[in-house]
Every structure is written in C-alpha cells, then in structure tokens.
Image (tube, grey):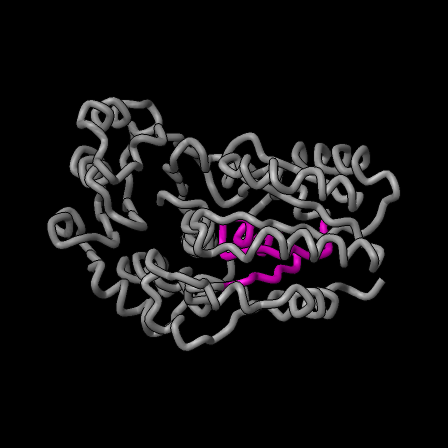
Amino acid sequence: MNALGDVITTLPSIHFLKRSDRHNVDVCVKADFTEIFLADPYVDRLISAPNSWFDIQPPSPCDQIEEITVLPEFRTHYDVIIDSMCIPQTVKLIELLKPHAATGIGFDSFLHVYDHPVTIELWKSWSEEMRTVCDCFADVVRAWHKDYTESVPVLYVSLLSQRWAVEWLANKNSRQLPLVALNPGAGYQLKCWPLSRYLELGEMLTTKGYCPLFIFGPNESALVSQASQQITDMNGICYSSPNSRVQNVAALLQQCLLTVCNDCGIMHISAAVGTRTLAIYGPSISKLWFPYHQDWNQVLELDVECRRRCSHDQCADHKCLSDISTLEVLVRALRMLPKC
C-alpha cells in the first residue's frame, strides 16, 4: 500500500495468517513504512522495497522491477502471495516468482495473475456497505479460503523507541504533567480541523492540568512555523517528525493519555498502539476508515447535509469541520481521559 493508514489496517490480516497457519510470513513494504513491522512478532522477514516501486502514478520503470526481484530476500518459493492492492510492479513480481497461489485486490487488466482475485468493484461495494477497511483488506485472505474473523490493528513498538520516548519527554516535560497528544495535520488539507482550534484546545488543556504534545509530520513545516511560538507560550511540547518512520512517533503516543487528531496516519498509529484516540472527521466515512471500535476510542463528526454529496476538492466552506467548536472537542476529550 502507498499510505501509512492503509498499511496499518492490513495488520490484522497479517497477524491472522501467522496465528492460524504458523507459516513463515514475509512482508514486502516500501522503505518508508518498514518501521511499522520492525518489532512485530508475527513477521518473519521484512523486505524493504524502494519507495518509487509503490508509486502507481506513473508506474515505476521496468528496470526497477527487475532489480528488486533479484534481491536475495525474494529467492524462495512462496505457497501464496497476498496482494492488498494490485499495482503493475506486483503483477510482475507474481509472474516472476510463480507462487503456488496468488490472491489480491485488482483492476480488470491485472486480475489474470491471481488464482483467487478480488475485483476493485467488489472491494468498493463492500466499502459502501460500511464494513471497516480492515475487513475489506481481509477479503483477500478469505479469497484464499481462510476463515478470517475481524479484529483491530495492533502496532508493536520497539524497546529502543520506547526508551527514547521516555528520555525525550523527561527533558521536555519537566513538571511531569499528564500528556495529551494533538495532531493538527493530515495528508489532505480538507481533512484538517483548523490549526487555530487545535491551539485553542491546547491552551484549554493546560488550564486543566495537562501538557499538550503537538505532533507534526515531515511535510508539515508550514504548520510548525505557524504554531511553534504559541505552543511555547502555553508551555506545550512540539515534536516535528523528520521522516515518515513511525516507531518514535508511536512510542511518544504510547506515553500520552489521549490523542486528538484528524483522519490521518497519526490516528491509525495512536489507536493501534493502544492510546485512547479521539478522531475528528470531516468528509471521510468514519464507519469505514476508523476500525478501532473499543470503548476508549471515539469519533467526533457532524452529519451536515453537504457531507453526503461532498466532492472534497470543490468544497468551499468545510462546514463538516469548521462547525465543530473547540469547546465541543474539549468536553469530549475530558470525558475520554482516564480519571487520575
């Protein structure tokens, strides 16, 4: 997959395969996302592929495909290759490795490579029926005649990252106040609750005795520039991730009592490491993209009329997000926080 949240939502399927069959399970993933699996006890081998190999617009040149398929990690016979979303590069990989069986989600022009295909149209129809994304991805496992039962993603954090997070926060949070993580960014701007509201929320949390930990991704330097002084003034903490790797971010989130975030990769990381998560949803469908239905996780969203027909890119006023008040988020967050 080409997005952080998509990779994390395939974790239940991967863990199911290891638990049910006790076979060796290898995971091939783009280099930026290898850290998702570094501490995962259910993955036997991690095959790191160039990021460009997963760039489907446009497809990577064939010479990159040939190069990766001769890596020593691939020199084995696989009983089955399970492809969560077909791209030309993985079609070529299946053709060259010739596994005993192959199953995957794919477009019509690619389905010939699969013994147990799942069409993109069927995948989308399942999505419209409000199944979670974990369940939709798991249908490639079911197509291989495996009786998968839905579960939530679990992301394992390395001891090295856990130790780093404890030491880093000890230097930043000298008063040892309870931490609440705030993540104002997202991969798509139209999924973002306004930055000004996050800053207001941070200030309100400080008056309640909490320390706000603002987390920004590697592509959010503009947000950091806008917010850093106000975060300092409220005695909050600012962490700007230098890259797309997740272990250190996951370890920081583990130290927090709650994460308040948009529909984004941080949302998936937070919930998958077991931190209480309040996700603010705009135009996305939470019933599909928030598969974390434990009692301690919640979604805050407005069912405004235009949201049902939203074209996302042409949205003018973002009412589904702009009409959510800071006070409303604060009240929900305080209800979710554990009693100290």
Name the quadrant of the N terminus.
Answer: top left
Residue stretch in magenta? 256-281
Position of residue 125 relative to residue 177, above or below, is: below
For the point 47% across and 56% down, the residue is 191
Quarter of the figure with the C terminus: bottom right
Q: Position of residue 269 (x, y in %)?
A: 55, 49
Q: Residue at x 56, y 30 (%)?
A: 242
Q: Position of residue 318 (x, y in %)?
A: 45, 63
Asked whether, in this view, residue 95 is left or right of residue 201, the answer is left
Judge by depth and name the residue closer to the eye, 250 or 300.
300
Q: Residue at x 35, y 28 (%)?
A: 50
Q: Is residue 35 left or right of residue 89?
A: right
Q: Residue at x 33, y 67 (%)?
A: 127
Using the image as rendered, state which of residue 19 and residue 2 is in the foreground.
2
Report the residue that reaches farthest toward the front.
316
Residue 250 visible in the shown view: yes
> Is residue 25 located in the magenta-colored stretch of the structure?
no
Q: Identify whether 16 is placed above or below 308.
A: above
Q: Does the magenta segment cover residue 262?
A: yes
Can the viewer see residue 22 in this picture? no
Vertical relation: 336 (above or below) 27? below
Residue closer to the observer: 328 or 119? 328
Q: Position of residue 26 (x, y in %)?
A: 39, 39
Q: How many marks?
A: 0
Q: Quadrant of residue 131?
A: bottom left
The percent coordinates of residue 337 (x first, y second) are 74, 63
Image check: 281 left or right of 232?
Answer: left
User: Residue 161's quadrant in the figure?
Assistant: top right
